[in-house]
Amino acid sequence: MSTVGGLEHPIDPLADAPPEGWVAGRSPWALAAHKLVRNRMAMAALAVFLGIVVVSFMGPFYADHIAHTDPFTSQLTATTVINGKRVDVLQQGGGVLKLGETPIGPTWQRNYFLGADSQGRDVAARVLYGGRTSLTIGIGSAVICSLLAVIVGMVAGFYGGVTDSIISRGLDVVWAFPVYLLAISIATVLLTQGLTIGPFSISASSLWLPTLIIAVIYVPYVARPVRGAVLSVREKEFIEAAIAQGASNRRLIFNEILPNVITVLIVLLPLMIATTILTESALSYLSIGVQPPNASWGTIINDGQQLLYTRPWVAIAPGIMIVLTVLSLNVFGDGVRDALDPRAKLRVKD
């Protein structure tokens, strides 16, 4: 029995269990997948995230075939038709004082659905293009960060000793810096000269630059949990048995340890994608992330900050997309954690 809201309710521990006889012969991955699929909140969050991804990557289709506009070209003299009447995209004498120019507001039609920005560009099309950029950088940097963190964490945890001390102190140095301050410092330097590593050169306007910066600064946040998991698994009996059978270091790492710590990475990956998307948006908002002519949700919010009192949708639309994306990833990440962690139980008040 459990008490919820002052009332006693019976708890059936097998309510979410697989059908009888289904568990036999199933791998832990199949059981975890079954539990995750039965988590309605996690599946709904995944559907929202996938929907945002699909809609964002349809940005070129929307701009070319629906809005019939170029979201990267200034449209200072453009006009559009609203309710059968042709109007200017940049309207003269807007605002309280009726001075200057004010971009057209949301038309809720296929042209300028969310209105225009100060350059006369279609906000809806730019939000979709910006989402494609933000998602590409966010997912790419999270994957690169996870790969680097696995290598660093595995080496530190497996070999220990001096190797572990050197790597751990290096991670501590990066960890000691406030993450946004470190990202801003690196981005400010690299935006002036780009990045050259041997024969490879990355220009300041390339999307690879913010992707690599964000990936590197978050390596300690993933490598430390991986290292801890490796240290724990390394002391297990099956590792000692493998060593007694003459297993090489390569076999121990890839066949025995890695499969037992990969769940840590899988749980962290959705949360890291949400974090990297937020970081990219913040850097782009400060004009040290994605550079023109590319656009991201952060750059669009920056473009709309001067229009908050007249055309707030320019900044609100990308802000809503960021909130929905990050919220859905966090909810889905919680569902993945509960599915992969056998100790995760329903929390009730006894």
Image: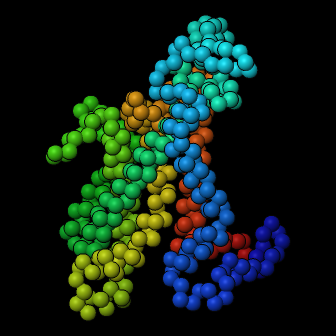
Quadrant into which the C terminus falls: bottom right
Q: Residue at x 57, y 60 (%)?
A: 332
Name the foreground residue: 289 vs 57: 57
Q: Position of residue 2 (x, y in %)?
A: 76, 76
Q: Residue furthest right?
A: 7
Q: Position of residue 127 (x, y in %)?
A: 54, 35
Residue 261 visible? The answer is yes
Q: Residue at x 37, y 67 (%)?
A: 226
Image quarter of residue 248: bottom left
Name the foreground residue: 201 vs 99: 201
Q: Residue furthest front?
A: 65
Q: Position of residue 80 (x, y in %)?
A: 63, 19
Quadrant into which the N terminus falls: bottom right
Q: How many marks?
A: 0
Residue 124 visible? The answer is no
Name the foreground residue: 147 vs 169: 147
The coloring applied to the image is rainbow
Name the foreground residue: 82 vs 195: 82
Q: Position of residue 51 (x, y in %)?
A: 59, 50
Q: Is residue 51 above or below residue 131?
A: below
Left or right: where does residue 42 sit relative to residue 299?
right
Q: Residue at x 31, y 59 (%)?
A: 148
Q: Residue at x 51, y 80 (%)?
A: 28
Q: Is residue 216 above or below residue 210?
A: below
Image quarter of residue 46: bottom right
Image quarter of residue 157: bottom left
Q: Is residue 308 above or below residue 37?
A: above
